[in-house]
Image (cartoon, helix red, strand yellow):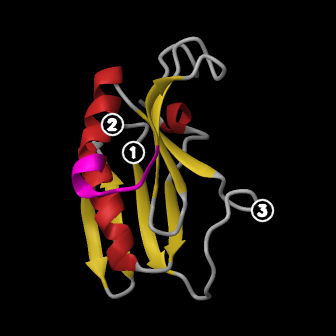
Amino acid sequence: MGDEAARGAFHHIDLSVTDVAAAKRVYGPVLEFLGYTQVKDDAEGCEWDLRGREPFGASLGIRAAKSAGKHDGYTPGLQHLAWRAASRDEVDRLHALLIDRGITVLDPPAHYPEYSGDYYAVFFADPDGIKLELVHAPGWI
């Protein structure tokens, strides 16, 4: 696919976190479950890339925050971040991994018809309270 097919897709997301090591214990297993590969791990932070799925390759990085404060999804800034799942089973398998790793689950896997007729998701949080989601919604964008 050419560059036009990728136009408008996210290229990368960088998040500031209070504790890189604690955040890595959440983002590492989740991103690796989703097929990302860790490409950076140093004193400045970590980064994972999703490659081989062009035009939708992407990168997510975590970096140490330069100022203190807990994330609040209801003030200006990031409200939450959601990844697509290939199936409901994948959502359920990630939920099991979250429980196994002691990652905070906000809402276990469920059907959310108020979002769309086939919306099925699990909601969880990183150590700073950033809300994260894995969703299977084949009939929705």
| Chain part drawn in magenta | 99-106
Q: Is residue 49 above or below residue 34?
A: below
Q: Is residue 122 above or below residue 61?
A: above
Res. 45 visible in picture: yes
Q: Secondary structure at mark 1?
A: loop
> Pointer 3: residues within 10 angstroms few (<14), some, or many (20+)?
few
- Between residues 100 and 37, which one lies in front from this camera angle? 100
- Between residues 10 and 45, which one lies in front from this camera angle? 45
Mark 3 vs mark 2, foreground winner is 3
Residue indicated by mark 1: 57
Q: Amino acid at mark 1?
A: Gly
- Taking the image as shown, residue 30 lies to the left or right of residue 82, namely left
Q: How far from the left and from the top, in percent, is residue 33?
A: 25, 45
Q: In the rendered image, which quarter is residue 4 located in?
A: top right
| Residue positioned most to the right | 76
Residue indicated by mark 3: 76
Q: Amino acid at mark 2?
A: Arg
Residue indicated by mark 2: 53
